[in-house]
Image: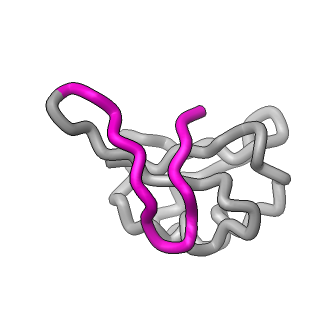
Amino acid sequence: MPALVDKAKCNACEECIDSCPTEVISMVDGTAWVNAEECIDGEACVDACPVEASSMVVVVSGRVDRRIFGSGLLGCV
């Protein structure tokens, strides 16, 4: 259940980068990008994002299920 970033909402503030305990978030083309293979699903980036661009996604029965985690609203990129 890696974190995803909604590129349309991301304002490049880097709060998610600063909050990630495993340092798997970087800036790519002006928006935050999460290395899904290294993400530990800690949700720190979701809580840190001031514009709710970061989200967690759960796969249920082969479908992506969008849910609210922390203070952020889920959304796929």
| Residue at 15%, 31% in the rendered image | 61
Closest to the observer: 49 or 71?
A: 71
Counting from the top left corner in percent of width and height, residue 76 is at 54, 36
Majority secondary structure of the magenta segment? loop
Compared across the picture, whether 17 is left or right of 29 comes to left
Counting from the top left corner in percent of width and height, residue 9 is at 76, 47
Q: Is residue 11 magenta?
A: no
> Is residue 3 depicted above or below 76 in this figure?
below
Q: Is residue 63 magenta?
A: yes
| Residue at 55%, 43% in the rendered image | 75
In this rendering, the count of numbered labels is 0
Residue segment shown in magenta: 62-77
Q: Residue 8 occupies which quadrant of the picture?
A: top right
| Residue at 67%, 66% in the rendered image | 49
> Which residue is situated farthest in the top direction here?
62
Q: Residue 18 occupies which quadrant of the picture?
A: bottom right
> Is residue 70 depicted above or below 68 in this figure?
below
Instruction: Give the image's coloring scheme.
Output: one colour
Closest to the observer: 19 or 48?
A: 48
| Residue at 34%, 40% in the rendered image | 65
Compared across the picture, whether 71 is left or right of 36 comes to right
Query: Which quarter of the rendered picture does the C terminus lie within?
Result: top right
Compared across the picture, whether 63 is left or right of 49 comes to left
> Is residue 57 depicted above or below 61 in this figure?
below
